[in-house]
Every structure is written in structure tokens, then in C-alpha cells.
Amino acid sequence: MSATTQMGTQMSVIAVAIAVVRRDLLLALRRKSEVLTTLFFFVIVVSLFPLGIGPEMSLLRKIAPGVLWVAALLATMLSLNRLFGADYADGTLEQMTLSPVPLGLLVSAKILAHWLVAGLPLVLLAPVLGLQFDLDPRSLGVLMVSLLLGTPLLSLVGAIGAALTLGVRGGGVLVSLLTLPLYIPALIFGAGAVEADISGLGAGGHLSLLAALLALAVFFAPWATTAALRIALE
Amino acid sequence: MLTAANLACTRGERRLFAGLNFAIEAGGWIHVTGENGSGKTSLLRILCGLSQPEAGEIRWNGAPIRELDDEYRKILLYLGHQTPVKEELTARENLQISGALAGTVLDEADADAALEQVGLGGRERLPVRFLSQGQKRRVALARLLTSPAPLWILDEPFVALDAAALEMLAAIIAGHLAGGGIAVLTSHQEVTIEAAARLTLRIAA
């Protein structure tokens, strides 16, 4: 056996973060069933309402924003356990903590990958599902924008809950109890935007508030998640 | 040089160790021994900075590791008793991502060369879930060959390895030490590693 070979050049911090995003996307691609289950859950929950309520268009139009948003919350929550669970179990999270790259950046990369896999598809599916509720194209557009701003917020806030419940027995139920109340502002402004648009008030105010919440979460959530992960790994 | 001064660790109500002192120069290795539950893993995690000691301090070349922070993480390679590989990824992808986390770019040729050396030649593109437990450990150990880190902290690195792999790992560690590295490892079996200096640290409850 030869002496230890030394190879490889140093990677920039950003290159490492990109490698983490790539890895998580690759993992999602190889575990398709897990990803598809949550998407089907979203589709089915949303589709049950028109079937249960019947073809009463005015009522369906009224409940559409709320139903779509609540379904998006629940679908995101179902996927939260896999955000850190596997990496915690096999020791990868420990390796991330010991990486020279700041843990906060790696956590941000993981949250971004989570949104790309669990959040973005919801945004793209929403207009198709909205058709079942007889929403007009304009409202569908507002719905998409509200979800585009809202789903990253759900991933960011959810990451805090997922990190806090890491390694706790029965963490799956606990994470919902912990994060659902935190999702309430996103729900109010997200669903509110579409309702305001339908009633002719304009969605601008709601969307701005949603964007403000997102900006706040982008700043604080990775930091809070990192702190929670460090406690879980102690 | 890695120095520990007056280290103490308590888990719950139990005092695992106290007043632990040691120093090891470049080229030497420390064999941490002790019964199950005596605190070997706790000691290694403290040495990595994963947990804080109750008292005492660890210094790398004279500087406390808490102040070195990411500078210390740059020179450190830690392998815990878990095997940090992803079942869905191939051996090559696993090695590349663990290199990336440590800040090292590994192209396919680098990764394959390391996998070849740990006896996984021809299995680079197989998802790790098709490998045996021992082969998974080898994928994790291949990282040792690609890492420029001078300080290796290995928790039970010999577990699940066959006789040939034991010898191979001992040779890899010996090569690392010959190149001026330092290794701290735990193991229940007696291991022979050629080195300039060896320190046996027995942790007793």
C-alpha cells in the first residue's frame, strides 16, 4: 500500500452548497416513491372537496383558496421527516457539522433542495387542481404566485420543526403539532390573497406581507434550524 | 501536535472520566481502550468538537480548538461508528459527496482509484445498497485515502471488516502516520500499526 495519496483541490463554499443540493435532488430521484406519495396526497385531498360538496360553483370558488392552501400545508408537513431524518440516522449530519463549510449554509442548501422537490411541484400542480373549483385564470395566477412565495416559507419554517424533533420518539406527530401553528400566518396571507383577488380587493397587500414573511424566514430559519441541529447532535 | 489538558466528561449522573491528559506528536497514534460504556465515543466526540467537555481543553499545535473553529475542522477527519453512506447512491457518488463536504474536489478518476485501493474495483457504479456491510464500511474508509486532513479520529474503524481489510486499514493508517499525520482510534481488538509513537489510553470508570 502506498502512502496516503493527497489529491483534490479546495472547493469554494458555494460549490459545496451546490454539491449538497445536487446530492439531495439525486436522492429524491432515486427514491421517487417517497416524493410522489406526498404529491399524490396533495392531488387527492384537493380533489376530494369538489367530489364531496357537489357541483355548487359559487361555494367551490369560495373555499378553493383555503382548501388548496391547507392541502399544501399538510403535504409539506408529510415530507418534513425526510428532510434531516436519513442524514441523522446514518451519521451524514455529523459529517456536515464537522465540515469546514458553515453548517448554516449546508442547511440552507438542504432546505432549497426540499423546496425544489416538495414545494415547487405543488405550485405547478395548483392551477390544474384549481380548475376543479371553477377559478378563473386571473385567480389561478394569483394562487400560483401566493404558493410560489408561500411554499419556500413552509419549507423554511418546517425545517426548524424537523430539526427540533430530530431523534425524538414519535417525532412524526410532534413535528405537525410544532409546525402547523407556525404555518398559520402563511395560510392566512396565502389563502387571503386569492380571496381578496376574487372579491375584487386586489391581492397586492397580502402578497407583499407573504413576501415579507419569506424574507424574514430566509434570514432566520436556517440559523434557528442550525442551532436546533447542534442540540440534537450533542 | 494534539494535546488534551485535564479533560472531564459527565453523561447524566455518571462521571465517565476526569483529569485526562495526553499529548501526541505528528507521526504518532493513540489507541483508546476501555469497556463498553466507559466513554470512548464520548472522548472522541469531544476531541472532534462535536460535544463540549465538562472541564479541560483540547489544543491543536498549541491553540485551543474552540478558537480554531473551522480551521480545526479543515484539518480533521472523523469517522463515527455509523457508516455515513447513502444506500441509493453509488460508491463513487458517496465518496465524491463526502469529499465535497470536507471541501475537496474529487473527480471520477480520483474516486475510482481510492475505491480500487480499498478493494471495491469494478463496483464503483453499483448502488451501495447492493454491497455487504463490510463493503459499505470500505466505501466509508475510502475517504481516508482521498483526504488531506492530518488528524484522523476513528471510532471503531475495524468493525465489520474481514482479515484482509483489517491489514489494509492498518497499512492505510500507517501510511498516514508516516506522512506526519496523527490518528486517534478506538478498538476492542489488538491492532498493530507501524508508527513512530503509540499511546494507549485506557478509560476506566
Image: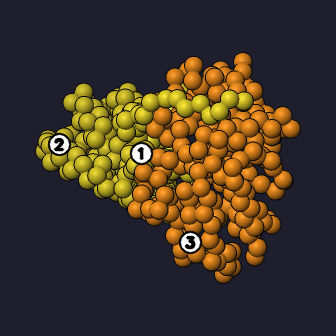
Chain colours: A yellow, B orange
Task: Give, as a three-letter code, the residue at label 2.
Answer: Ala
> Considering depth in this image, is A143 or B199 the residue closer to the camera?
B199
Of the numbered discs 2 and 1, the one sitting upstream in the chain is 1
Q: Residues within 10 Å of mark 3 (few under 14, many from 20)?
A: some
Residue farthest to the right, as pictured: B163
Q: Which residue is mark 3?
A: B5
- The spot of residue A4 in percent (x, y) is 62, 34
Of badges 2 and 1, the one in the foreground is: 1
Secondary structure, mark 2, is loop
Residue drawn at (71%, 47%), measured in percent from left and top?
Answer: B195
Residue underneath mark 2: A203
Q: Which residue is mark 1?
A: A101
Task: Using the image, determine if residue B141 lies above or below residue A192.
Answer: above
**Hey, what amino acid is under mark 1?**
Val
Label 1, label 3: how far apart the Cα atoms are: 28 Å
- Per the model, the C-alpha gap separating discs 2 and 3 is 63 Å
Question: Residue A56 versus residue A219: which sits nearer the camera?
Answer: A219
The residues bearing labels 2 and 1 have C-alpha atoms spaced at a distance of 40 Å
Which is in the foreground here, disc 2 or disc 3? 3
Q: Residue at x 80, y 47 (%)?
A: B192
